[in-house]
Amino acid sequence: MSTRYYPLYQKGNPQLRIFLPNFWMKLVKPQFNNPPNIVEFHCSMQMTRLDIKNYLEKIYKIPIIKVNTRIKLGKFRRNELNTVIKDEDIKVAYAHLPRFESFEFPNMFAEQRANKVKDKQTEKEVSEPLKKKIEEHNKYKAGLPLWFQ
Amino acid sequence: MATVIKAFKGLNTVNTVIKSLANLSLNKSISSSHFIPQKILSVHRCAFLHTTSKKYDLMEFFDDPKNWPKDTVKVGRSWSEDELRIKSNEDLHKLWYVLLKERNMLLTMEHACNDEYVIFPNPERYDKVEESMKNLENVVRERNEAFYFLETGESGERPSVYVNNILGLKQCYKLCQHIIPKYCNLSWKEKHRFGFNGYAVRKFLRLYREKLWNIKRKNRNRESNAAITLLKKFPDLDIEALKHKYPSIDINKVLRHNKLKGVRRKSYIV
């Protein structure tokens, strides 16, 4: 197909252009304590360092000094049938921002967690008087099956 | 123009930008010199219309901070092919990058959620983006094909041929360009061995064909037996329905079967 099939590149020919790239990249929380100007990505396996640099610079307009990549081996684990399976390998990219720029991975779920704790507390506040009411109601019906109540 | 600016001010998330892109070609026609003097237009020409969000930052990889604590994130549907066919090539190109960014955002958020043991809200968003990307690619493919047929009389698709592999089975081989010609390209020859010969392969093929035939035969027998038992129980069965249910059997042969000798049907369609 036009967008996925490229003619052979020979030296001296005009550079091939990608019109609809289907590479994906995801920004992940750094595994190690990196310097603040290094951002960690997982990306599609076919991407080279140059691809990653161009991708971030052209599509996201992020200035990149250098990119390092490595391939992280997928985990070996046993599934429910107790057979050994291997997860897919991941290409990890470390993109270096300019020297004095920094990026910190945002703490996105703190508010959600706090809300959940609050919700639980409010639930308790609502449910406890109801519980007491039911207990009082059933005070003299101990041992009576629910069907008769 | 003012309405356009208002509309764009209200849009923050990428999702809404995707939707608003539907009006893009219309907006262009509006942005003529009737509304704004020429001089100002030349200064602000780029500032009025934005297909992507304004801020170019690493935070584009994350969802809108408003959506972080939410349990559900409501979004629209995916782009259909008919909608995309109306768009110009330029618009499609822009939309592709919007979709690409949206997909990256969703992947990032999903990964972060999994890391933090939080439920990822509305994972079907990813499917919607994927579907619209697929549709967009199909539309581009259609246009490409039409162009090539007009210009060269061939589709611009990657050519492919059916070849016999080493086991004598048919296989689709997608052709590609090589610098070294075929007859002296040893590394290619080692990888791609077409054609078969030898006693062992012929024996394998014989047995393989027998196996396929047996599967077919057993299926046919099973179906005809099922039809016979049905006809025994319900002699006045609708023959057409039976044909539809068991397409592999010969109905006339089944009706003349020994097992159905005593069964009397009201009407015979023979």
Image (cartoon, coloured by chain):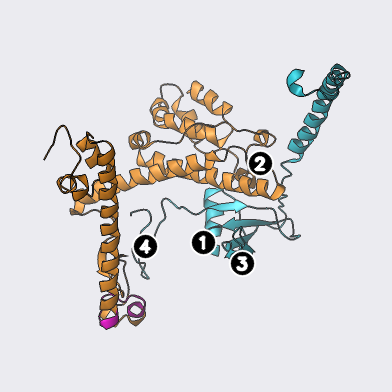
Chain colours: A cyan, B orange
Q: Which residues are magenta?
A: B188-200
Is residue A93 toward the left or the right of residue A29 in the image? left
Residue ID for mark 2 = B119
Between marks 2 and 1 in the image, the one whose residue lies nearer the viewer: 2
Check whether the beta carbons of the residues at disc 1 and disc 4 lie within 8 A of each other. no
| Residue located at (69% from left, 50% from top) | B115
Between marks 4 and 3 in the image, the one whose residue lies nearer the viewer: 3
Label 1 marks which chain's residue? Answer: A
Label 3 marks which chain's residue? Answer: A
Residue ID for mark 3 = A73
Residue ID for mark 1 = A47
Residue B156 vertical position relative to residue A143 in the rendered view, above or below: below
Between marks 1 and 4 in the image, the one whose residue lies nearer the viewer: 1
The alpha-carbon separation of the residues under discs 2 and 1 comes to: 30 Å
Q: Position of residue A112 (x, y in %)?
A: 73, 36
The alpha-carbon separation of the residues under discs 3 and 2 comes to: 26 Å
